Amino acid sequence: MGRISVSAEIDAPSARVWHVIEPIEGHVDWMLDARSIRFESDQRRGVGTSFVCETKIGPIALHDRLEITEWVPEQRMGVRHSGVVSGSGVFELEPIDRDRRTRFTWTEELRFPWYLGGRLGERLGGRWLLAWIWRRNLTTLARLVEQSP
């Protein structure tokens, strides 16, 4: 399983960062690889929320099935992937500078199917390509959070 972890410091308190990431449907505003989100549960927040995220990276488009497995406001949001790519992930928010800034860490443990390169795809595609894309996503998130009221 390929482990990917990226982080960024955001010039805003954790409460403001959470305010932007809490609405799952809004993740398409800062995740450049996420095209759309369709909920499969009536629930839209918290543990048990399930949804499909249409993801596109270059010519590869996937429908990623996700379920929220952990939900600690202003601290953690965990997911389980059960689509073509399987595994788990977590967003962690850590206050720094007396909560004037937040360290946002995004960690995923993903398993790729054979036709996406299997273990080699996990290592190369995950550690290089996905990490690069997710760092860009965190830059976009930081900009969005820092510009929000």
Image (cartoon, rainbow, N blue to C red):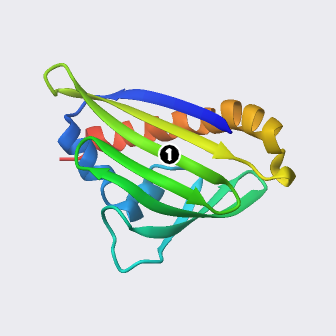
Instruction: Give residue 85's position: percent from left, percent from top.
Output: 68, 55
Closest to the observer: 113 or 145? Answer: 113
9 horizontally vs 58: left or right: left
Label 1 SS: strand
Closest to the observer: 12 or 42? Answer: 42
Instruction: Give residue 116's position: percent from left, percent from top.
Output: 81, 50
73 horizontally vs 2: left or right: left
Say what amino acid the circle numbered 1 marks.
Gly
Q: In the rendered view, tell whether residue 9 sits above or below residue 54.
A: above
Q: In the rendered view, tell whether residue 4 sits above or below residue 48.
A: above
Numbered circles on residues, count: 1
Residue at mark 1: 89
Q: Crowding at label 1, few (<14), some or many (≥20) Cα neighbours within 10 Å?
A: many
The residue depicted at 13 percent of the width and 22 percent of the height is 98
The residue depicted at 84 percent of the width and 44 percent of the height is 117
Q: In the rendered view, tell whether residue 82 sits above or below residue 76.
A: below
Instruction: Give residue 148's position: percent from left, percent from top.
Output: 24, 46
The residue depicted at 52 percent of the width and 62 percent of the height is 66
Farthest top residue in view:
97
Farthest bottom residue in view:
42
